[in-house]
Image: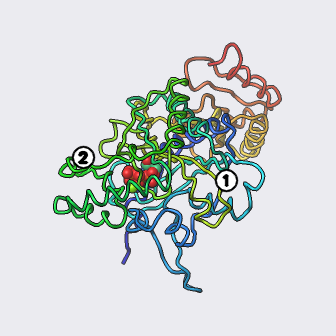
Amino acid sequence: MSIKLQGLRGMNDLLPDEAERWEAFEAIVRDWLKSYGYRPIRTPILESTKLFSRGVGEHTDIVEKEMYSFEDRLNGEQLTLRPEGTASCVRSVIEHNLIFQNPQRLYYSGPMFRHERPQKGRYRQFHQVGVEALGFTGPDIDAEHIVMCRRLWDDLGLEDIELELNSLGDAEERAAHRGELIAYLQAHESELDEDGKRRLHTNPLRVLDSKNPAMQGIVEAAPKLMDFLGEESLKHFEAVQFLLREAAVPYRINPRLVRGLDYYNRTVFEWTTSRLGAQATFCAGGRYDGLVAQLGGKPAPACGFAMGMERIMLLWLEGQDTDVPLNSPDVYVVHQGEAAQPFAFRVAEQLRSAGFAVVFHCGGGSFKSQMKKADGSGAAYAVIVGDNEVAAGVVALKPLRGDGEQQAVTPEALTELLADRLYGDSAV
Ligand code: ATP
Ligand code: MG
């Protein structure tokens, strides 16, 4: 009996038409990161579970219910497929003593895993590009991150985008606020929903993040963290805003923006859009000065952000026709006859050496059916080799787009002719 094998729920295959768009997006992103002086770091997808319970926080949604964890079959160690990239990046930086002398501007990119209910823009394997700046104290780096995001959205032509900004202050300020918040929430405990009751004792700040409409009244009237910020925190927040105004980046202060992860302090921000329904946030980040020490490193300031690639791709691809292949070859090589095959094979290699993208027809068939394949490949030209061409020591170059005559040309002259046709003044 045969069984039908399928990919896992919430984990997507990217077929070529789509994967090509992803590669185009990744190329734009790489150039953008380079233009701000960020360098890549690659860490394993699998880490010790401890890293995330420590680094993300025991009482976050991620650690409480979203991680893919299992036991190593040999030594029983608890392992987890990374649900986010910051903890791994910081672990690596500490382990390899990377910020011993110089601060670092880093980025990572790749799959993350969270056991959530799949829906549009929310998957179990999804992809993030994340940026981390380690060793910088000042508000300028916070502003740099936000400004660089804005540039990428502009480069991609994304529309209907908003920036929400808040400051979470520092640990003591949050502790003072936490005390009053808990007292307030306890006084209203009977009105809290189930999540609210649980978080009241584990992570009260998260209650403010509630999306439940029935909770909005309680949340609105709750003590605001902003009112507990001291002079230094306020100065930092002011300076970030000043640089944003200087760079003409519009923002909205949202005092209820707290972020789901435990490690943030001071600046937090989210980029949202009205175009993705409930999955409105497509990029989020902020400062996390405590994390390096929390993961066992010498204390060092840090800030960063991560963007969800699936959500950005949904926005970016909205206006694009994704059925059209993005990367068509320059040439499709058609051939028939015993002597024609090796001759054509050589010509194809010669063109690739000269930098052209060349598809060599494999699998035989009539000239007619091969020409159909050539046309379907999206190539600009067909190079045709039959017995007559082999005998004359030439190939036929036939334009597949627009008009233009088929032309016989020696392999030696072909490279230049093709370059002229494709990139010269008379390029098709
Ligand atoms: P959400 O509130 O949507 O669950 P989050 O606060 O859990 O988001 P972060 O941990 O801040 O998200 O991750 C940064 C970005 O990664 C998000 O803004 C989003 O674009 C993306 N992201 C997070 N979870 C998923 C997911 N399950 N599927 C697709 N993208 C995701
Ligand atoms: Mg989430």
Evaluate if marks 1 and 2 touch, with contact meaning CB atoms under 8 Å apart: no
Q: Looking at the picture, which amino acid does disc 1 mark?
A: Ile
The residue closer to the viewer here, 246 or 392, is 246
* Whether residue 122 is visible: no
- Say if disc 1 is inside 8 Å of ligand 1: no
Residue 419 appears at what percent x and percent y? 73, 24
The answer to whether residue 207 of the structure is visible from this angle is yes
Q: Quadrant of the C terminus?
A: top right
The structure residue drawn at horizontal position 62% and vertical position 35%, both measured from the top left corner, is: 32
Q: Position of residue 64 (x, y in %)?
A: 39, 68
Label 1 sits on residue: 41
**Which residue, given by chain and number where applicable, does mark 2 sit on?**
221
**Mark 1 or mark 2, whichever is nearer to me:** 2
Residue in front for this viewpoint, 281 or 225 = 225
Identity, as a three-letter code, of the amino acid under mark 2: Ala
Which of the marked residues, 1 or 2, is nearer the chain's N terminus? 1
Tell me the element at label 1. Answer: loop
